[in-house]
Image (cartoon, rainbow, N blue to C red):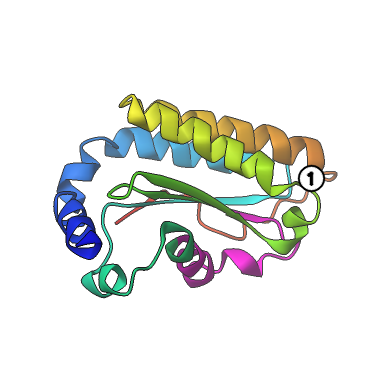
Amino acid sequence: MKTLKRLWQHLLHPRFRVQRYFPTPALESISRYIGASEQKHLGQIRFVIESNFPLAAIINAVTPRERAYQWFCNLGIWDTEQNCGVLVYIDFADHAVEIIVDRGIAQTIPNETWQQICDEMQQLFHNEQYLNGLTQGLNRIDAILQSEYPRTNEDFDNELPNDVVVL
């Protein structure tokens, strides 16, 4: 029964419906912010907003965290020179936010810090403040990375695209 309920929940969230909450101009603005942010720290930030899971993932009871790890790998976020990749993953149908960080960051910043950011974003999403949720999360991540992994020279190599992926 739980699988059927979840399947229904995912069917109710097609991509076109979710895109209404995240208009292209706003996502482009967030992408520009990510680019500007990365010039101040060593981190490489990616955002993925997934409207719903494929049928096989629902049947196999894939969790939002597992799906976030799949995207972390598929997008090569784990493969940055400084091991400072960060994925902010939003599973719209399950109302979940996950942050996956690369091993370099995981050694320095505790999971509780990332979970707190996820919780804050989920609360804003719950109040239908979707763009504010993305922006607030990005602001918090940016501040942490600037504090813990500041860029110390003028050389800047943008290893990952800055665009927000909406699926």
**Few, some or many residues within 10 Å of mark 1 (<14, 14–19, 20+):** some
Q: Position of residue 21 (x, y in %)?
A: 26, 35
Give the residue drawn at x 53%, y 71%: 73
Res 138 quadrant in image: top right
Q: Position of residue 134 (x, y in %)?
A: 45, 35
Q: Nearer the viewer, residue 116 or 155?
A: 116
Q: How many marks?
A: 1
Residue 139 in the magenta stretch? The answer is no
Quarter of the image with the N terminus in it: bottom left
Q: Position of residue 91 (x, y in %)?
A: 36, 51
Quarter of the image with the C terminus in it: bottom left
Question: Can you say whether 65 is above or below 18 in the image?
Answer: below
In the picture, measured across the screen, residue 74 lies left or right of residue 35, that is left
Q: Is residue 38 visible?
A: no
Question: Can you say whether 97 is above or below 79 in the image?
Answer: above
Give the residue drawn at x 22%, y 70%: 55
Residue type marked 1: Tyr
Which residue is tagged 1?
149
Residue sticking out furthest to the front: 1
In the picture, measured across the screen, residue 96 lies left or right of residue 98, that is left
Q: Nearer the viewer, residue 128 or 61?
A: 61
Q: Is residue 77 visible?
A: yes
Give the residue drawn at x 41%, y 27%: 124
Give the residue drawn at x 28%, y 62%: 53
Q: Secondary structure at mark 1?
A: loop
In the picture, measured across the screen, residue 123 lies left or right of residue 76, that is left
Q: Which residues are magenta?
A: 68-86
Q: Position of residue 60 (x, y in %)?
A: 32, 74
Residue sticking out furthest to the right: 152
